[in-house]
Image: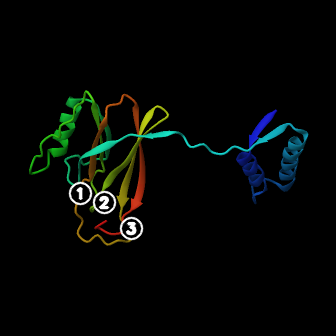
Amino acid sequence: MVVARGRFLRWAVLSLWSEGTMYRPTMLAMTGSLLLALLAGDIELALVTEVKAQEDAVPFSTLVKGYQSGIRQPERLAIRTAEQWQHLWEQHAASLLAKPDLPQVDFAREMVIAIFRGETDGPFPVEIRQIVERHGALVVRYYAFTPPPGLPLGVAIRLQPYHIVKLARSSLEVFFEKEVRVQNTLQE
């Protein structure tokens, strides 16, 4: 017996009848075959509700966030050692006039997530908005703000937006989910 989920079967029937998909005799034959199989009991409709994957929120705190960085290319990083952190911070602070102190992180208990936007033509930040554990991995969700279409920026200012956070140490693989959001004003 074949089990067809309600949504798939509805899609299959509708797509068969959509204009230009197949020749009319083929559409009739396939739709008829599906209906006969359903009536004969060869296909059982299983109405399944979508189940959202279980996610557990992972608390984090911002170490630094800003618009000027020595890292000029887009980067999304998970830092798990003091050596990696030191190297990243040196790259980040390389072009800054006032060299900020390295924020303290206890890598025996914590790790760092860093997102660098790369160079942009205005104050359009990145913002880590949520970290969750899902399917045995850490998922970092972040916003990448962009200007609305046609917004006159005036004189282009080259900025390098970034957001760096720390959270409890984890050996799980890290994935990043980017959501592009339109920033309606330069003050938002």
Q: Amino acid at mark 2?
A: Phe
Residue 81 percent coordinates (x, y): 25, 29
Residue 145 percent coordinates (x, y): 36, 58
Q: What's the CA distance linking mark 2 and mark 1? A: 9 Å
First-in-chain label (2 vs 1): 2
Q: Which mark is residue 148?
A: 3
Question: Please, is residue 85 above or below residue 121 in the view?
Answer: above
Residue 40 percent coordinates (x, y): 90, 39
First-in-chain label (3 vs 2): 2
Q: Local crowd at mark 3 within 10 Å, few (<14), some, or many (≥20)?
A: few
Q: Local crowd at mark 2 within 10 Å, few (<14), some, or many (≥20)?
A: many
Instruction: Specify how the rendered protein is coloured.
Output: rainbow
Quarter of the image for residue 101 reads: top left
Residue nearest the observer in this picture, 28 or 39:
39
Q: Could you tell whether 146 is left or right of 17 in the image?
A: left
Q: Which residue is mark 1?
A: 159
